[in-house]
Structure formats: C-alpha cells, structure tokens
Image (cartoon, helix red, strand yellow):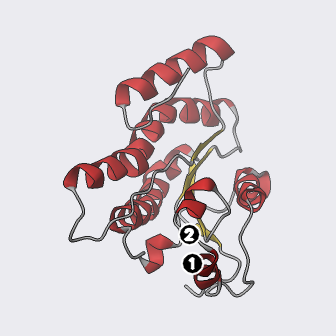
Amino acid sequence: MELNQASQDSVHAYFKKYIKNTSESSLYGLVVNGAIYHNSSFEDYDFTDWQRILDVNLNGAFHLSKAALPLLKKYAEDNPGHYPRIIFISSVSAYMGEMYASAYSVSKAALIALAKSLALELAKYRINVNCICPGWVRTDMALAQMPNEDSIKDNLGAVLQNRWLESSEIAAGIEYLLSDTAKGITGQQLNITAGIDL
C-alpha cells in the first residue's frame, strides 16, 4: 500500500492495514525519513511549493507520530523496562540554513523542536524521541542539487573528511538509537556529518 505521509487519511489507512496484516497491536520504533526538496530563491518561492515541503517534511512527521503513538504506548505497557522510540531524520540544514532551500531548512529545524517537545511529553509513557541530523548523504535528492563536479567539490570542500556520507552510515545511527544501549537518550540530536562545522 502506498503511503502519502502528507495525508492524514493515507497515514491512518496505512496503520490500519499494518495492524490487520501483521496482527500486531504494538510498535517498538517509528523512523520518519520521508522528505522532499525544492530549490528556489526566497524572492521567487511560490507559497504552493512552500506549503508542499512543509506538508511532507513536517506535517508528515505529525501524522505518522500521531498514528503510531497508541501502538508505541501499547508496546511500553506490554514490555516493562523497555523504551519504544520515535526517530526523526532532520538535517544539518536545520542548524546552518541552506541557500535556495528555505522551506526545507525550516521543516528540518522544526523536526528538532518537535522531537524535544515530544521527548518531554511522552517520557511518562517511556517513549524516547530523537533526531538524526545528516550532512551530505549520497542520494538522488542530494545529487540533484549538485549538477556538476564543481558544485560537488564546493559543497564537499566544507566537510572535514571531504567526502559523501553513505546511507549505511545514517542507518547505523538509526540502529544505535533503536538499540537498548541508547535507552537513556531522548530529546537529543545525533549529528552524522563527516565533519561539517556546526
């Protein structure tokens, strides 16, 4: 089933199908990674594009977290001593801003604030909420913002290790935050940047 995280109806239908197909009434972890990007100067930014970015990147996190919350609470109730997790994938753009990507940067900064607020609010249910803030990860979306070797060199030149991050490195951060070792971490950001000075 295709999931449109910007649509509350789509998210609720997805979780309803998940419960039906898996016979699961609880959930240990939710990782919110879906995001889109739009490149435009602020002067030329169309509000429709601005709203679309926020609908997917920020409102999508709201819809998914709301839908998952009863399942996460049920997991905590059924498994004393365990801490279900919500992990938002933010970005270093949340700290630094990004030229021609104001809506993207705003949406990613808002995820950090959302994680901190939910960490405070959901602690009573033993639910941990954190963010991962990656630097430049070699993805189709990132490559689309660097159309030639010069732009790649310029962007990666600001990275101490002077290289792309790989998706597997972000996955390792997610695995860590989902692990029992990280049960004491909530309301925090894990910066995986290959050495961008934040």
- 171 to 195, vertically: above or below: above
Residue denoted by label 1: 151
Q: Residues within 10 Å of mark 1 (few under 14, many from 20)?
A: few
Quadrant placement of the N terminus: top right
Q: Position of residue 157 (x, y in %)?
A: 64, 87
Q: Residue 13 appears in which quarter of the rendering?
A: top left
Q: Is residue 74 left or right of residue 61?
A: right
Q: Position of residue 81 (x, y in %)?
A: 71, 44
Q: CA distance from mark 1 to mark 2?
A: 5 Å
Helix, strand or loop at mark 2: loop
Residue 132 seen: no
Q: Position of residue 114 (x, y in %)?
A: 41, 57
The one of 50 and 65 positioned closer to us in this rendering:
50
Amino acid type for the residue under numbered disc 1 = Ser
Whether residues under marks 1 and 2 lie with C-beta atoms below 8 angstroms apart, the answer is: yes
The one of 185 and 102 positioned closer to us in this rendering:
102
